[in-house]
Structures are given as structure tokens and as C-alpha cells.
Image (cartoon, rainbow, N blue to C red):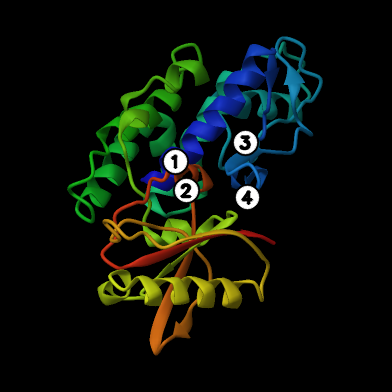
Amino acid sequence: MWLIQHCARDLLEALAFLHREGYVHADLKPRNILWSADDECFKLIDFGLSFKEGNQDVKYIQTDGYRAPEAELQNSLAQAGVEVDSGCTAAVDMCSLGIVLLEMFSGTKLKETVRSQKWKDNSGAIVDHLFASNSVVCPAIPVYHLRDLIKSMLLNDPKQRCSAETALLNPFFSIPFAPHIEDLVLLPTPVLRLLNLIDDSHLHNEEEYDDILEDMKEECQKYGSVVSLLIPKENPGKGQRLLTGRTFDGKFVVATFYPLSAYKRGYLYQTSRLAVYIKKEF
């Protein structure tokens, strides 16, 4: 949920800017979404089908499986040689984003589902079913805000779909989700988090603590310049973000990345194992 929230917010901010300027992306899909480790955000790319709203200069827009109903109709008419005034607006981007977020939540490609008559008749019912199925896996997570947000993006009438700016006000974005270790492996940042590296006894001996800092810095500098290194002494069970797994002093090290913004604020996500945080230049 942390990953979905992060991705949704970044893409909505991108679309809100684009739509304020009067442009439609017209091809929002997973392949056109990239993660920037430098800026620590998701970015929207490939504006090959983009157009100024009200002045569409491309006949066929959006990719199959992420296409809004009005774009489907327009593409079909264009293919049949029927000249029509474009009725496609920025709302087509919101429909595509709704499908992307639904795929992220369900973990399933929905191309065939989106092409089905059931989806065209009542996409909301399919969204409800997917959320009901996944709520069994993680019943404690309040997912209904995300469900309602996605449904508001997928309404058949483009005039009734939520805008990017309205979507950003949804309560889903006020929930303080924490990342899972899988999230932290997926998204590279300049900060690494090493888990299972030390135990509590190392933190109470100042000399041993300093030795560990030096050993860690020396080892990590083999792979890049170390800007800073942190081993929390108080509440050391807080943390998350680093790279690969190795052994250190006989222990298997779990390595993931860690959000740079959280590291700068000194905020360390809760975890059950002692952690070391390293800011590097690669």
C-alpha cells in the first residue's frame, strides 16, 4: 500500500500539472512510468501521443488494456474512416491511471478483463470484487479509500470522473503507510539499509561501537563513496532501505534501499531487527 500510495501521488501530481497546462498524455500505462532514484519519485514519460485538449492531432490514442471508453469509441470510428470531432479530454488519463492502480493492488494484468463486456457494463462491480478478494490477505489495511478513488477514476462518463487535483485530496493519501521490505528492494535510492548486522550488545560498548562504524565504512567504500553512516543507538529497532545480502561477523545481512527523504528527517521505519543506514554515491 505504501508503494501504491507513493506511485499514485507522484503520477497524480504529474497529471495535475499537465492538465492545468491543457495537455492530455493519452498513453498512460506501466511501461511509461519510471522510477527516478535521484529524485526519489515516479515519473511519467513518452509523450508521443500527447495533444492539446480540444485540438487532438492524433487519431488513435491510448494502449489496449488502458483505454478509456470514449477513446475506444473514437479509435473505432477513426479506423472505420468516420470523421468525428474528438471528444477525448484529460479524463482519459484518469481512466488509464485507475486501471494501473488496480493492477498494482490486485497484482494481476487486467487487459482481458478491461476488454470484457462485464467491465464495460459495470467496472465498479469488478473493482469491488478484486478488493473483496484481496482484503482476506491483508484485512487490517484500510483499503476502502483506495477502492473508492479507483472507482471514481473509472466512471464511464468522462465528465463524472474525478480530476487529478481532486484525486490528490482523497483520504487515501493521509494514511501513514510504512513500506514493506519488498518495496524497499524494488526502488533504488542513495541510501542503503543493512539489517541483522549487529546485536544489542554492540550498542552499549562505545569502543566496540566505534570499531563497527569504521569496519562498516571500510567495507562499503569498496562499492562507492560513503557520504554518511548511521547506526541508531536509541530505539535501534526502527528502520528500512539498502541493497544485496552478505555475511558480517557470521550473520546473514539483509540489504535493501531506504527513502532518502525519511533518512534526512531522521525517521526510521519500524523493524524488528537492528539496522545500519549508509548514504552512498554510486
Seen as rendered, the residue at the extreme front is 207
Badge 3: how crowded within 10 Å, few (<14), some, or many (20+)?
A: many
Q: Which residue is mark 4?
A: 37
Which of labels 4 and 3 is toward the front? 4
Closer-to-camera residue (209/104):
209
Q: Which residue is mark 1?
A: 265
- Indicate the amino acid at tag 1: Arg
Taking 272 as reference, is 41 left or right?
Answer: right
Badge 1: how crowded within 10 Å, few (<14), some, or many (20+)?
A: few
Badge 2: how crowded within 10 Å, few (<14), some, or many (20+)?
A: many
Which of labels 1 and 4 is toward the front? 1
Quarter of the image that includes the C terminus: bottom right
- Indicate the amino acid at tag 2: Tyr
Image coordinates for residue 85, horizontal then vertical, percent: 72, 11
Q: Earlier in the sequence, mark 4 or mark 2?
A: 4
Closer-to-camera residue (109/207):
207
User: How far apart are the two marked residues, 4 and 3, measured between alpha carbons?
Assistant: 21 Å
Q: Earlier in the sequence, mark 1 or mark 4?
A: 4
Determine the secondary structure under disc 3. loop
Q: Which residue is mark 3?
A: 28
**Marks 2 and 3 in Cβ contact (< 8 Å):** no
Q: Which residue is mark 2?
A: 263
Q: Earlier in the sequence, mark 3 or mark 1?
A: 3
Which of labels 2 and 3 is toward the front? 2
Name the image quarter holding residue 188.
bottom right
Q: Please indicate, yes or no, whether residue 68 appears anywhere in the rendered image.
A: yes
User: How far apart are the two marked residues, 1 and 4, measured between alpha carbons?
Assistant: 18 Å
**Marks 2 and 1 in Cβ contact (< 8 Å):** yes
Number of callouts: 4
